[in-house]
Image (cartoon, grey):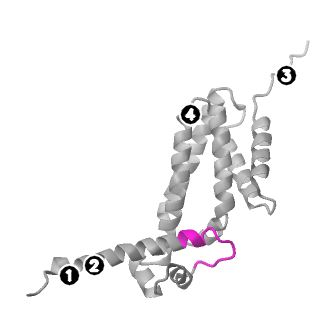
């Protein structure tokens, strides 16, 4: 008695799902490992798969890295969105900046690996993250927690670029991140109005 084709296909579909998951997790692991060149062969070796299997799972290396980075950025974006609902806008911004630095410290190699790749999902996720940081800053300004004389877009770039530089520092540590955020938040405090000349 022959096995129905639908049943015959189930193990192959299960293997494909498993292989895709293994390749995705391998790429995410390598994205946190400085000095690694993300080639299909490197990802396949990390996943315990053949290079052809990895290509079949995602089609191209770009598509695999795009999926991996998008996956990594997901929790960070959700945390930023949760921060928007916190009662204290200033504390919410400070807390998210610390999380952003910790993420960048663990994955700073990611930006270098993305150069020249076609990563539309990552581009979209990064834009969402940047927009949410912009909203966190605007909310903190509206609450009087940080100065409002700088446009939120300027402050977004300022904080984002400075946080990335701190994350990449050879001296990067939780203490350095906390010190940086303290200095930045102090610098962003509303400035007292200058007294009018008599």
Instruction: Rate crowding at label 1 as few (under 14), some (14 to 19) or many (20 or more) other CA atoms within 10 Å.
Output: few
Q: Are marks 2 and 1 in contact (CB under 8 Å)?
A: yes
Please state the total of marks drawn on the protein image: 4
Q: Which residue is mark 3?
A: 194
Image x and y of residue 27, in percent = 53, 72
Q: Which residue is mark 1?
A: 8
The magenta stretch is 27-38
Which numbered disc flags the more N-terminal residue, 4 or 2?
2
Instruction: Tell which tag, 1 or 3, sits nearer the viewer.
Output: 1
Q: Is residue 147 left or right of residue 13?
A: right
Q: Please identify the dominant SS of the magenta region.
A: loop
Considering the numbered disc 2 on the image, is that residue within a helix, a strand or a loop?
A: helix
Instruction: Rate crowding at label 2 as few (under 14), some (14 to 19) or many (20 or more) other CA atoms within 10 Å.
Output: few
Q: Which residue is mark 2?
A: 11
Which numbered disc flags the more N-terminal residue, 2 or 3?
2
| Figure quadrant of the N terminus | bottom left
- In the rendered image, the vertical position of residue 35 relative to residue 165, given as above or below: below
Considering the numbered disc 3 on the image, is that residue within a helix, a strand or a loop?
A: loop
Task: Name the residue rendered at 80%, 41% in the picture.
Answer: 183
- In the rendered image, the vertical position of residue 86 relative to residue 129, given as above or below: above
| Figure quadrant of the C terminus | top right
């Amino acid at each position: 008695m022959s096995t129905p084709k639908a049943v015959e296909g189930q193990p192959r579909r299960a293997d494909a799902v498993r292989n895709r998951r293994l390749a995705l997790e391998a790429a995410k692991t390598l994205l946190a490992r400085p000095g690694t060149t993300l080639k299909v062969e490197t990802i396949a070796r990390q996943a315990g798969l053949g290079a052809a299997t990895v290509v079949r799972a995602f089609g191209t290396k770009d598509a695999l890295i795009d999926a991996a980075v998008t996956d990594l950025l997901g929790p960070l974006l959700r945390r930023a969105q949760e921060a928007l609902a916190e009662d204290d806008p200033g504390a919410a911004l400070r807390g998210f900046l610390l999380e952003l630095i910790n993420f960048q410290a663990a994955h700073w190699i990611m930006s270098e690996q993305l150069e020249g790749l076609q990563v539309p999902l990552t581009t979209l996720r990064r834009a969402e993250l940047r927009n949410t940081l912009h909203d966190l800053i605007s909310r903190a300004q509206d609450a009087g927690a940080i100065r409002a004389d700088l446009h939120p877009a300027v402050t977004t770039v300022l904080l984002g670029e400075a946080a990335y530089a701190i994350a990449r520092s050879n001296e990067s540590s939780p203490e350095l991140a906390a010190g940086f955020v303290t200095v930045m938040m102090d610098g962003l405090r509303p400035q007292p109005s200058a007294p009018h000349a008599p």
